[in-house]
Amino acid sequence: MNRIEKLRNKLPANTKGAIVISDTNREYLSKLLSSAGTLLIFPDTAYFIIDSRYIEVAKKNVVGAEVILQGKLYEQISELCSRHGIDEVLCEEEISLAEYNALKANVGSVHFIADDTLSSAIQQERAIKEPKELKMICDAQAITDAAFLEILNFIKPGVSEKQVAAELEYTMRKLGADGLAFETIVASGTNGSMPHAVPSDKLIQNGEFVTMDYGAKLCGYCSDMTRTVAVGEVGEEQKRIYDTVLNAHLSSMAAAKAGVYGDYLDKIARDIIYEAGYEGCFGHSLGHSLGLDIHEKPMSSYARHDLLPAGTIMTIEPGIYIEGKYGVRIENMIFITEKGYKNLTGSERKLITL
Ligand SMILES: [Mn+2]
């Protein structure tokens, strides 16, 4: 069964039509990486409308939909809907209000429904990775791991956070990455207490932690890893924080398997961190799923109750952040299986002192 057929099976039986235009949902279902395109899904057929820039590759790649060259898009949507007697079409929640209003204004014969029916069906499908998707993410992570080994030779006192970020990104590109999974985070010393610090001109100094959160993108798929390393000798409290985060990371990971809830894993990590005396120093969630997007559902969050099914990929990324002093975060990706999990991240997790 192709992805479009699988989606049809997930939608309510009375669904007449669906339109997919948001980038990663469209890319997932069409299997075409592109900056444009409209996927129309009807009960027994589907159309992928795409402009001339992508028409050639679309004809080769798109499975489960007839590829049509885009002309006057809204007239084409109207014509296809009326040809198949479709007067009601589900939209994704991810589209903009402008896109939704344009559909309503220009395709008057169709009633467009903008609730979460279509989005949640696609989200559930995307959460379970196909073997090829898993391989792509593992290949992206292999590049991320290799770049980590390289950067250990580069980090030293006097090098700036921006230089470390640039070197990481250049190394990943050289190793075959198509791009970055997200904006690289490099935070040293006191900047480390900000979980999503932007790399600055600050120079790394002896006795500081350097936290790097980064990942390669390959064939549209993201990898995601965080490591904190020590430059020179660090203090006793820094070591205690590192050990606590590592313990929280390993303990929550050990409990991962299909059927557990994300908030359960979050609580295991959070309890360890709070009991060590760092309540209030771990503000974000334990982790998230990822794929074509860097953040996908389900999540491992104290604020949600998401079931983790077999076949999903989750990050495990606890941290401790002490304002004005330092921060530590350790992040791996795992693949959830019926019996447990498979660790997808190869880089060392014990404290590395440079
Ligand atoms: Mn992450």
Image: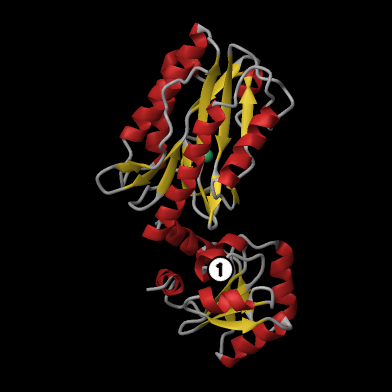
Tally the numbered discs: 1
Amino acid at the residue labelled 1: Leu
Q: Which of 129/278 is in front?
A: 129
Q: Which of 95/203 is in front?
A: 203
**Residue 329 in sight in this render:** yes
Residue 106, percent from left and from top: 74, 79
* Residue at (49% x, 32% y) in the render: 149
Residue topped by disc 1? 32
Residue 172, percent from left and from top: 57, 43
| Farthest-out residue, top | 236
Q: Which of 4/106 is in front?
A: 4
User: What colouring style does the render use?
Assistant: secondary structure
Q: Is residue 150 above or below residue 176?
A: above
**Residue 271 in sight in this render:** no
Residue 13, percent from left and from top: 42, 76
127 left or right of 49 in image: left
237 left or right of 2 in image: right
* Residue at (40% x, 60% y) in the render: 132
* Residue at (55% x, 26% y) in the render: 153
Residue 211, percent from left and from top: 57, 26
Q: Is residue 113 above or below residue 216?
A: below
